[in-house]
């Protein structure tokens, strides 16, 4: 990804009409991934990932692989989680994706940092916090659509955000 595509929070220089359309579409993909998972709509969820997508969890929940390397593996993993939660744990998940920050936006690639919260509604009516973490998504434009090419789920410590001080290759420097 070109370092010239790095976006400072609040920067407007790179926000033309196409960039604004791209940002809206990218945000929709990141949010839709959680909503489709909650609904169990795995056929549509599969379309949000590139054919060479990678999904990483750091650290993974017990018994879950740390890396899934094909869309088929990713969807199989999601399907397993969804069925296990409903059938064995007795919980229905709700993913909330918030604080989306698009840190890099190029013509065909983008990077997004976000926070996720997963709550659960249990069969006994209780509500509970199931998971909290961060996503770091790298998306790729394929035709007229943005898709997730690489997602890392940070389950413990938040990932570092790149900062202007650490980036000495930005334009104008």
Image (cartoon, grey):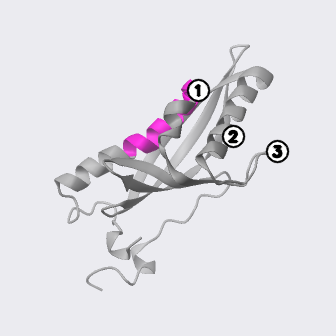
Provide the residue designation for mark 1.
Answer: 40
Q: Quadrant of residue 2?
A: bottom left
Q: Is residue 74 above or below residue 45?
A: below
Secondary-structure class at tag 2: helix
Q: Is residue 148 above or below residue 107?
A: above
- Characterize the local packing of mark 1: few (<14), some (14-19) or many (20 or more) Cα atoms within 10 angstroms: some
- Characterize the local packing of mark 3: few (<14), some (14-19) or many (20 or more) Cα atoms within 10 angstroms: few
Residue 141: image tag: none
Q: CA distance from mark 2 to mark 3?
A: 11 Å
Q: Nearer the viewer, residue 48 or 170?
A: 48
Q: Nearer the viewer, residue 152 or 134?
A: 152
Residue range of the region highlighted in magenta in the rendering? 27-41
Please tell me whether residue 114 belongs to the stretch shown in magenta.
Answer: no
Q: Is residue 46 above or below residue 111?
A: above
Disc 1 or 2, which lies upstream in sequence?
A: 1
Residue 63: image tag: 3
User: Of discs 2 and 3, which sits in the foreground?
Assistant: 2
Disc 1 or 3, which lies upstream in sequence?
A: 1
| Residue at 45%, 79% in the rendered image | 166
């Amino acid at each position: 990804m070109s370092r010239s595509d790095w976006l400072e929070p609040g920067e407007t220089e790179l926000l033309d009409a196409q960039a604004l359309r791209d940002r809206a579409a990218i945000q929709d993909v990141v949010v839709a991934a959680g909503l489709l998972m909650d609904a169990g709509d795995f056929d549509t969820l599969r379309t949000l990932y590139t054919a060479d997508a990678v999904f990483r969890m750091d650290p993974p929940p017990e018994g879950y692989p740390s890396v899934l390397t094909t869309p088929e593996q990713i969807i199989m993993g999601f399907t397993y989680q969804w069925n296990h939660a409903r059938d064995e744990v007795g919980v229905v998940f709700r993913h909330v994706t918030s604080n989306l920050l698009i840190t890099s936006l190029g013509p065909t690639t983008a990077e997004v940092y976000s926070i996720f919260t997963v709550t659960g509604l249990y069969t006994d009516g209780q509500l509970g916090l199931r998971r909290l973490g961060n996503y770091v998504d790298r998306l790729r434009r394929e035709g007229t659509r943005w898709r997730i090419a690489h997602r890392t789920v940070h389950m413990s410590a938040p990932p570092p955000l790149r900062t202007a001080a650490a980036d000495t290759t930005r334009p104008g420097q």
